[in-house]
Image (cartoon, coloured by chain):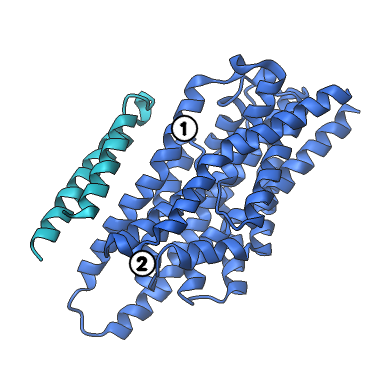
Chain colours: A cyan, B blue
Amino acid sequence: MDRRALFFLFAAALVAALIPLTDGEFRFVPIGLAIVYVVLALASYLDHRSR
Amino acid sequence: MELAAVVLVVGIALAFDFVNGFHDAANSIATVVSTRVLSPRLAVAWAAFFNFVAFLVFGTAVAATIASGVVEPGALSIGVIFAGLIGAVAWNLITFYFGLPSSSSHALIGGIAGAAVAKSGFSVLIGDGIRTIGVFIVLSPLVGLALGLILMVGLQWAVAGYPKVDLINRFFRRAQLVSAAAFSLGHGGNDAQKTMGVILAVLIGAGYLPEGSDVPLWVVLSAHIAIGLGTLSGGWRIVKTMGSKITRLQPIGGVAAESAAAATLFFTSFAGIPVSTTHTITGAIVGVGASRRLSAVRWGIAGRVVWAWILTIPGAWIIAGLTYAIIAALS
């Protein structure tokens, strides 16, 4: 299993958990960041599989 | 008597700013020094200059958050701010002694909150302000990490297959001067404003300025001069931790890490969110290392850094609370 993909998924979950706690004005930051980490996890997984 | 107390607290606030520069600005130059782009002496001068000129770029939104967004302004007496600063300075010196890159910003917030709670109880804390700062304690390193990784991968793609490796290295060594300057600018903007916020709170609390006042120009200039002089004095134990122990950096990685951290600091400074420059650059350096593979990051050192983050607010809080209790008992 790709440990880096798991790390990014964990980061995405952590950031997503912060969405309801974030002030409405800045909520786009954790939302965008969670999406970025999911994409990074996917990219890392595909990179790992292709080797 | 009150004027003397105000002058004393303003002096301690500027000393905190100086220690902040001494303690935190090492982050600005760690990558430049570890990749041997600049000598340590030139690197601190470079960072100090951009720390100082940050007042020309950023507003005072972070200062306003510190002055009125953490603790009810009415609870910020001169004694509370004095005790808060003592807590923050003491914590910074303790972590400096142990070579831990903890956050001066969170030490300041923990110190002021701890002293205010010791005086008036938990009801004086402003929930929304504390929550936003708390959320960004976690978000700022993760934003730095993601941006650092994405920039690193993007830059590597951009130069992949280019035959003249020496030329690429030379380009990125020079580009690091720009990225280090941008990071120092962000550091000066975000961190000097915290001191400006403290001084603003003291001046309002003592009745020298009406509530809702802007930060006076002399406060802006003195805060930036103090942080610049602190940077010029340097903090080499922490440079060593940040620059070489988290991951091994090449000039291209230094550019990616500093640019990612600078972008994060620019955003938070304009948004009025006090964040830790230490957290941000650490996250960005880890992101650059993780672009190769997770094992390129020395997680033991990164873990020590995380412990310093966890302990900073409670540590400064307790010292400041005890200091306030002593002041109250003596007076």
* Label located before the other in sequence (1 or 2): 1
Which x, y percent locates residue B276?
51, 45
Q: Quadrant of residue B90?
A: top right
**What residue is rendered at 57% in x and 26% in y?**
B70
Residue B264 visible in the picture: yes
What amino acid is labelled 2 in the image?
Gly
**Pick the front one: B307 or A30:** B307
User: Which residue is farthest top?
Assistant: B123
| Mark 1 surroundings within 10 Å by alpha-carbon count, few (fewer than 14), some (14 through 19), many (20 or more) | some
What amino acid is labelled 1 in the image?
Gly
Answer left or right for B41 relative to A27: right
Q: Between label 1 and label 2, give the one nearer the viewer.
A: 1
Alpha carbon separation for disc pair 1 and 2: 29 Å
Which x, y percent locates residue B329?
85, 23
A21 vs B170: above or below: above
Answer left or right for B315 relative to B245: right
Q: Are marks 1 and 2 in contact (CB under 8 Å)?
A: no
- Which residue is label 2 attached to? B253
**What residue is rendered at 49% in x and 61% in y?**
B242
A40 vs B235: above or below: above
User: Which residue is farthest right?
Assistant: B1
| Screen quadrant of the C terminus of chain B | top right
- Which residue is label 1 attached to? B134
A41 vs B325: above or below: below
**What residue is rendered at 83% in x and 38% in y?**
B8
